[in-house]
Image (tube, rainbow, N blue to C red):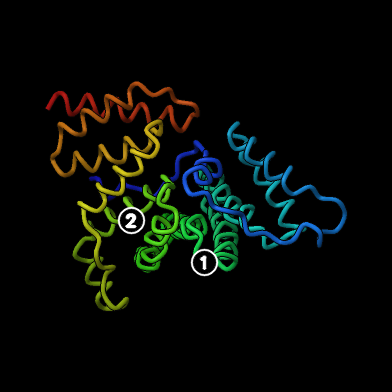
Amino acid sequence: MLTSTFRFLIPRRLLLGLACWCATGSVALADDPKDAPGTLDVPALLKEAKVLQLQYRESAALARYEQILGAFPRNYDALWQAAVLSVNIGARYTDESRRGAYYTSARQYADRAYAVNPKGGEANYAVALTLAQQATIRSARDRLSLYKSMKPYVYRAVEYSPGFSDAWQVLGRWNYRVAHLNLIERAYCRLFLGGPPTGASNTKAMEALRRAHFLDQCRIQYCYDLARVYQNQRLHGHAVELLKQAAELQPMTSEELEMSRRCRKLLEQLEKS
């Protein structure tokens, strides 16, 4: 069933810094490098970290951002990127304690980025992403509370950075998950959370995921997410067309290879039906 498997997992393919900067023209909010002890070259470290991300060397990239934050704890770019990388790395652990430790660290980085720049689309995205990932390892009660807490962040992320494809993906996933809360979940929200999150719908989920795919048509994960929603909404023709596009994409990581396999399997299923 889609609602039980539609997880807030972020793809490993990281073009976050470059894609977001090119789309939004955002400017880093950082401490003054002249105040740093020693001669730490922050621009060079930021550039090196982004190159490492493009090479899928996420642990090494995270280490560079943490090095920057050791000297400049309010460097905006280092904070939100460290949050996203901590989520990505943590998601690969099967041990929940290790995953939880990375997610906690990610949440701390995201909250600090938000404190530096609350109108930054990247910071709002980072907070939403960490809340979503924390929900995957929490109890049902905590998970519902986290989903409700996510709403303002997912909407502000796309408002402040409308060209940031990953923000649209998280918004789409949030809409779909909340629109499919079951009766027990909705009853709990009414009794203990002041009601379920409002405004979520399948239509909004499709619109957000279409936007993510439009902004970056080389992301296999976007194709799969949107095709699954199309399938659930009985829009099989749209799903088949999208999955055929996904079949033409070249996987770059083991995660993308697995996602490509799922796309092919879903395509075969839909074509048979």
Residue drawn 26% across the image and 78% down it: 191
Amino acid tagged 1: Pro
Image quarter hosting the C terminus: top left
Residue for point 38% across, 66% down: 152
Closer-to-camera residue (120/144): 120
Q: Which residue is mark 1?
A: 118
Residue appearing at x 52%, y 39% in the figure: 14
Q: Position of residue 59 (x, y in %)?
A: 64, 41
> What is the C-alpha distance between the residues marked 1 and 2?
20 Å
In the picture, measured across the screen, residue 85 lies left or right of residue 73, that is: left
Is the residue 102 above or below the residue 189 in the image?
above
Placement of the N terminus among the 4 image quadrants: top left
**Residue hosting label 2:** 174
User: Is mark 1 in CB contact (under 8 Å) with mark 2?
Assistant: no
The part of the image, by quadrant, that contains residue 70 is bottom right
- The residue type indicated by label 2 comes to Trp
User: Could you say where residue 22 lies in the image, as x and y percent from the top left?
Assistant: 51, 42
Q: Which mark is first along the chain, 2 or 1?
A: 1
Q: From the top left corner, tell me how far across and down residue 269 is, in percent.
A: 20, 27
Q: In the drawing, does residue 33 fall left or right of residue 272?
A: right
Q: Is residue 88 above or below residue 193?
A: above
Q: In front: mark 1 or mark 2?
A: 1
Q: Is residue 270 above or below residue 45?
A: above
The location of residue 51, given as percent across then percent down, is 64, 35
Q: Is residue 228 above or below residue 200?
A: above
Q: Secondary structure at mark 1?
A: loop
Between 190 and 61, the one lying in front of the other is 61
Relative to 168, is 99 on the left or the right? right
Q: Residues within 10 Å of mark 2 (few under 14, many from 20)?
A: many
The residue that appears at 15% across and 31% down in the rendered structure is 237
Q: Which mark is residue 102?
A: none
Local packing at callout 1 (Cα closer than 10 Å; few below 14, some 14-19, many 20+) is: some
